[in-house]
Amino acid sequence: MHFTTLLIEPPGTDSQLINLMLAPEKFHVKTAECGPAAWNLILENDPPDLVIIDTDLPLAGNVRIGAAQLLDLMSERLRWRNAPKLMLTSDDSAAIFQQSNKKSVCAAILKPYDPRRFIHEVYCCIRKQLDAHIKEVNRQHIELGTEIKSVAKLYNQNAIKGRLKEILNSLERHFEFEEEFMLQHYYPDLKAHQKGHRRLFDNAKELIDELCRSDQVITGAKIDQIIDNVFDGVDDDKKYIAFLYDLLESLTSHITTGNTAVCAGN
Ligand SMILES: [Fe+2]
Ligand SMILES: [Fe+2]
């Protein structure tokens, strides 16, 4: 599994050093060498697992887009808002560290910094991100389960049909959410998991479409059939979640063995 990083850093020794430090740790690093380049990259791409941003960005032509503006842009964009940010700065003024209080800035490191401290903070940020993903997957599973089971309590046939269609939409969004993360991180069983999702979704859609078209009463047995179908994919998800927890564990052990300090906020 790989993690993606956007490094916003002018060309030079710092940039080379960071690339050198991150490569053996299986991070894919994309670099933006100035504010405008980072600006375009943020507008045109999905967020990475971690943004590393140097506050000392140079002028690009006559244009200066600084770290504060980039942080504002990211916070305005739904998908970038929660991507963790690690700031590197040679400015120890309060203003810089106020920026670092923004919710998704997980650490601010004063330059010159100890490379071990840098790697430690990178791992802390990634671990937080992974932990948030696991919590979100679990939350969606509980929500889906609750939604499906609530159908059995409804009596009005139109209400049942409406709820079944909503469940189908939630299921599709949930599968997209899982697959996007798997794809971005090279989950080894992605293909098999995707295949399971397709089979499960097609079966659920066929059942629900048929029920919604028909004038027959939707019985408890029919609803149970949908529930059984949706929970048929539970083994694939158990495997995925076990994989994520293993990964979280390996990040945690890397942090605790590489450095005894505890991540901020944990
Ligand atoms: Fe799932
Ligand atoms: Fe799944």
Image (cartoon, helix red, strand yellow):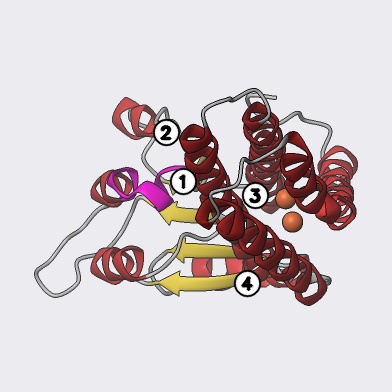
**What amino acid is labelled 3 in the image?**
Val
Q: Label 3: few (<14), some or many (≥20) within 10 Å? A: many
Q: Amino acid at mark 4?
A: His
Please tell me whether mark 2 sits on a helix, a strand or a loop. Answer: loop
Q: Which residue is mark 2?
A: 100
Q: Which mark is residue 87?
A: 1
Q: Quarter of the image containing the C terminus?
A: top right
What residue is rendered at 64% in x and 41% in y?
A: 218
Q: Nearer the viewer, mark 3 or mark 4?
A: 4
The Cα–Cα distance between marks 3 and 4, rounded to whole angstroms, is 13 Å
**Residue at the spot of label 4:** 28
Say what secondary structure mark 1 lies in.
strand
Magenta extent: 74-82
Per the image, the residue denoted by label 3 is 122
Quarter of the image with the N terminus is: bottom right
Q: Give how far across and how far down residue 66 sits, in percent.
A: 25, 53
* Picture residue at 27% right of the left edge, 50% below the top: 73
Mark 3 residue element: helix
Q: CA distance from mark 2 to mark 4?
A: 24 Å
